[in-house]
Image (tube, rainbow, N blue to C red):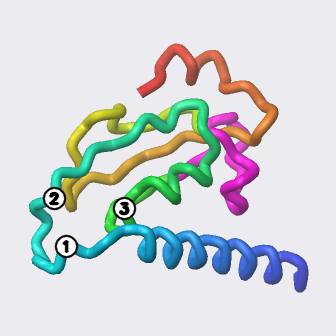
Amino acid sequence: MRRAAAVGAGALLALAAVAVTSAEERPETGTGDDTEKRTVPDFLGLGLWRVFTRLDRRTRLDVHDVSGRDRRVLWPSRWQVCTQYPEAGTDLDRRTTVMIGVVRRGETCPPRVRTARR
């Protein structure tokens, strides 16, 4: 039980570090409004860590395992992106949730997922 708690706490610390790092890298506009045009980058084939570092901290994100094993996605550096929705180049606004389907590094994306890449 202690190990599970330590793993969960480690994952939270890693995600917090990403949020702090990404917030420091982006300059604030100071206007307070959301007039800046943001689009979805192309994440297919990249590591999940890139998703966390390239998306704005205000973007809602849903990450899930598409291998069919329904595993928890805890360490972003151990996963690679197979699917994304919306597709690259789509405009983002406050209501958009980016959905990312991943498999562990070294695994191939399942055929049903590769043919239905969103």
SS assignment at label 1:
loop
Query: Residue at 83% across / 76% down in the picture?
Result: 4
Q: Residues within 10 Å of mark 2 (few under 14, many from 20)?
A: few
Kind of residue at badge 1: Thr
Please determine whether, in this image, residue 89 is positioned above or below residue 112.
below
In contact (CB < 8 Å): disc 2 and disc 1: yes
- Residue 63: image location, x then y, percent: 53, 52
Q: Give the range drawn in magenta.
A: 63-80
Residue under pointer 1? 29
Q: Does the magenta stretch include residue 64?
A: yes
Give 27 or 16, whichever is nearer the viewer: 27
Task: Please report contact status of discs 3 and 1: CB closer than 8 Å, yes or no.
Answer: no
Question: Could you say which quadrant of the image residue 10 lies in?
Answer: bottom right
Task: First in sequence, mark 3 or 2: give its number.
Answer: 2
Q: Mark 3 falls on what kind of element?
A: loop
Work out which quarter of the rendered image holds the N terminus and state it: bottom right
- 102 w.r.t. 118: above or below: below
Left or right: where does residue 96 sit relative to residue 35? right
Give the distance between the C-alpha atoms of the residues marked 3 and 1, in whole angstroms: 13 Å
Residue type at mark 3: give it.
Asp
* Residue bearing mark 2: 36
Mark 1: few, some, or many residues within 10 Å (few <14, many ≥20)? Answer: few
Residue sitting at 66 percent across and 80 percent down? 13
With respect to residue 9, does 68 lie above or below? Answer: above
Numbered badge on residue 56: 3
Q: Where is residue 32 in the image (x, y as percent from the top left)?
A: 13, 78
> For the residues marked 3 and 2, what is the alpha-carbon distance in whole angstroms?
11 Å
